[in-house]
Amino acid sequence: MSDECTCGDLRAILALQAQFCQLCDLAKWAEMRELFTEDAVLHVFGKDYVGKDAIMRFISRRHLGKHMLSAPDIEIDGDEARVVVDHTFYRYPDLVLFGAGVYKDILRRTDAGWKFARREIEVHGHHVEMTAAAKQRTKPIADTLEEVPS
């Protein structure tokens, strides 16, 4: 394997990020499982899920919905890449914003391509917190577009 970063590496890493979201949203667990290395770690809510089986047990029991990603920050060093990307999650069936946060990934280049070796999910906003905050707001920020503060 090469230590050089190519446009192909960048495309593959972007595709991996997108595939995670698409496969999760479509509940294609067998295909999603292949995005991870055998010894991968998923760190979320203060807990580590180690190995593909543990990761898939956790992910497949989550809410179904639609994931959206920002443009990622990617640093490649040989056969390892670090990726930081913001995400939002809209839960089915009503597609209400359910959560927002950051994915912090360590990817490993394998013979089969780039895979997740570690994914840390930071949740910065969650439906319960956002709902409570919305209930505290007693009046709208503005009644018309012209009244929106600049």
Image (cartoon, rainbow, N blue to C red):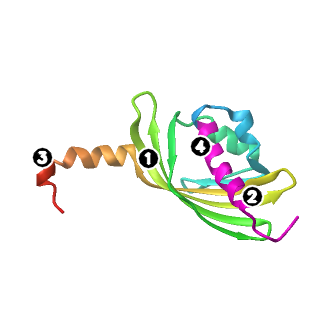
Which one is in front in this view, the residue at disc 1 or the one at disc 3? 3
Query: Which numbered disc covers residue 21?
Result: 4
**Residue 90 horizontal side relative to residue 56, left or right:** left
Residue 3 falls in which quadrant of the image?
Answer: bottom right
> 10 Å neighbourhood of mark 2: few (<14), some, or many (≥20)?
few
Identified by mark 1, the residue type is Gly
Identified by mark 3, the residue type is Thr
Residue at the front extreme of this rendering? 7
C-alpha distance separating marks 1 and 2: 32 Å
From the image, tell me which residue sits under label 3: 144
C-alpha distance separating marks 1 and 4: 14 Å
Which one is in front in this view, the residue at disc 1 or the one at disc 2? 2
Q: Which residues are magenta?
A: 1-24
Does the stretch in magenta take in 28? no
**Percent coordinates x, y for residue 105 in the rendering:** 64, 60
Query: Which numbered disc covers residue 99?
Result: 1
Which one is in front in this view, the residue at disc 4 or the one at disc 2? 2
Q: Earlier in the sequence, mark 1 or mark 2?
A: 2
Residue at image location 87% in from the left, 54% down from the top: 111
C-alpha distance separating marks 4 and 2: 20 Å
Identified by mark 4, the residue type is Cys
Q: Earlier in the sequence, mark 3 or mark 4?
A: 4
